[in-house]
Amino acid sequence: MSEIADKVLGPRVSDAELKAHRSRYLLPTILFAAVAVLLIISIFLPYWELTLHAPQYPEGLTVTASLNNLEGDVREIDGLNHYIGMRPLGEAAAFERSISIIGVIVVALLILAAVFVHSRWVTLLVLPALFFPIIFILDLQFWLANFGQNLDPAAPLSSSVKPFTPPALGVGHIAQFSTEAYPGAGLWLAILASILILVGLFFHRRAYKPLVEAEAG
């Protein structure tokens, strides 16, 4: 068991080596720690924003989505969606929203654990955070497509609107309505965290690969 743990954790850095090349080993640690901090901060910020433009609402209706909550003109947009047969926004991604906060915390803890892994196994620990923004957008797009493609045929205006797929990001058009969707501050932080992970992996490899090869040789 100890041998497996040593293989996963990788080589330890001697005091002499750390003193001689302190910045080399500190840099990946700082980058991974920064990633964890960014992810935790993102929990408290909006991840996605949507503005719906409709003839009866010239200034537009806006919905702001955090990881586990919807705010803004949700009731008004649900009212418009009711007429074309779309389900209320609050019914989307119920499971994802229920685990989102704890999920991001776990991902941040995995990143902090990566600080202590000096082998290629570090990749497994950072992968969830690396792909988190993409997974968020893909899941969001899935639910938008699910709602837009499964309209209630008994709705008052169902005959005038064909099934559609609103874009998770960018501009979309549905009958006389248009939507503008864009990332919130929380998602931008998660994207920045993904970029820092890639940078951190580069410096992690540069620091610890020679030690791994020296042990193997």
Image (cartoon, grey):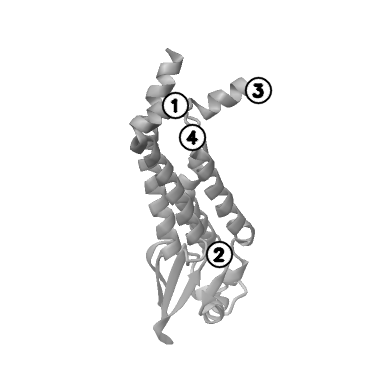
Residue type at mark 4 is Val
Q: How far separated are the C-alphas under marks 2 and 1?
A: 57 Å
Q: Is residue 79 left or right of residue 166?
A: right
Q: Residue furthest top?
A: 217
Query: In the image shown, does 26 or 115 lie closer to the viewer?
Result: 26
In primary-sequence order, the first of circles 3 and 1 is 3
Q: Which residue is mark 2?
A: 147
Q: Name the residue beneath numbered marker 3.
A: 1
Per the image, the residue denoted by label 4 is 122
Q: Residue at x 36, y 36 (%)?
A: 22
* In the displayed structure image, the side of residue 190 where residue 23 appears, left or right: left
Front-lying residue, 170 or 55: 170
Callout 4–callout 1 Cβ contact below 8 Å: no
Where, quadrant-wise, is the N terminus in this rendering?
A: top right
Q: Residues within 10 Å of mark 4 (few under 14, many from 20)?
A: many
User: What x and y, as percent, mark residue 136?
Assistant: 49, 55
Quarter of image, res 206: top left
Q: Mark 1 sits on what residue?
A: 14
